[in-house]
Amino acid sequence: MLTGALLILAPLFLGFALALGNRRLMTAIHYTVEGLVYFILALLGLGLGQMEGLAQQLGNMAIQVAALVVVLLLANLAGLWFFHRWQPMDVVTNGNSSRPGYRRLFLAGLKPLAAVAAGMLAGYFVLPDLPMAEDLATWSLMLLLFLIGLQLRNAGLSLRKLLLNRQGLGISLAMAGSSLIAGLALVPWIDLAWHDALALASGFGWYSLSGIVIGEALGPAWGGVAFLNDVIREIIALAIIPLLIVRRPAMAIGYGGATAMDFTLPVIRSSGGLTCVPVAIASGFVLSFLSPVLMGVFLSLG
């Protein structure tokens, strides 16, 4: 498993070490990342479709996903609430801010589910035996992490300023710490070793990473659980951000996890104003780095 951890971390840090200045190349990388995400999710679904006794395992997966979502939700909101009480943040909203299309955002949040469902149907009905799928998923994930490392390095953000953003750094650490506590709390209720449960709790909303990494290490069923947990986190975040961000900004920004710097950022910006943007980017950036590191470390302990 140590080799697997290195395969997760090495491409990410290699990409982050390279500085690029070509805008057209960065645009091409953006679209390649987007395509790779859906391709990897389809491969995750393919693995689920090829799994023996799929129908019998779906019920267990639903129970595991529900337990993971609920326990993480309660733990994360509690941890973020305590951080808010310790380091309160003032939010200045602009009543004229344009509102993003929430329907469009929710539909975009369902696209990953459609990719996995398409792969699962293909695996169940069309491609019941495709031995190269696992190797293909591994290489695709390595390429994805390398490209994401490039994106993070060349996003025009100062790493020093991000790490010195006290609110963003504190929110990300509160989110990560409360997630790990939730993972340990789940150990008696799910059939996993403590380090695997911690890996499962370390997705932080990055479903394209957690689904395939957990799936390769623990099997397609647990990969599906990790994926669904992080997709549901994203959907819940879209719903609660407008409700919480004015009075409890740390809870609203933090629960979005790694998506605070991309997918949920428009909702954070429109609901909380410009003052929330650098905090959200810093928090999402730190969690985007912590997620593969923590998953790699915990899975290597098996």
Image (cartoon, rainbow, N blue to C red):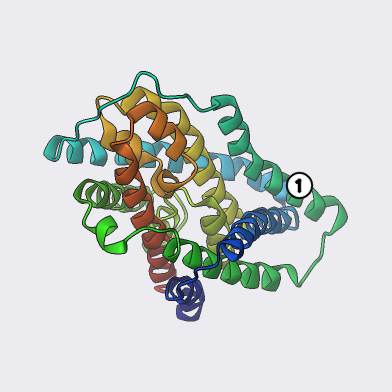
Residue at 26 percent across and 63 percent down: it is 160
Q: Residue furthest right?
A: 126
Q: In this view, does 153 lie to the left or right of 246?
A: right
Quadrant position of residue 47: bottom right
Q: Which residue lies furthest to the bottom in this view?
A: 3
Q: Which of 85 and 199 is in front in this view?
A: 85
Which residue was labeled with disc 1? Answer: 118
User: Please, what is the three-letter code of the amino acid marked with disc 1?
Assistant: Ala
Q: In this view, does 167 lie to the left or right of 188?
A: left
Q: Where is residue 102 in the image (x, y as percent from the top left)?
A: 54, 26
Q: Which of 133 and 192 is in front in this view?
A: 133
Is residue 189 among the parts visible in the rendering? no
Relative to 250, say whether 136 is above or below.
below
Is residue 55 among the parts visible in the rendering? yes
Q: Where is residue 270 in the image (x, y as percent from the top left)?
A: 41, 29
| Disc 1 secondary structure class | helix
Q: Where is residue 275 in the image (x, y as percent from the top left)?
A: 28, 36
Q: Residue furthest top?
A: 95
Residue at 41 percent across and 57 percent down: it is 288
Q: Where is residue 269 in the image (x, y as percent from the top left)?
A: 39, 34
Residue at 72 percent across and 52 percent down: it is 53
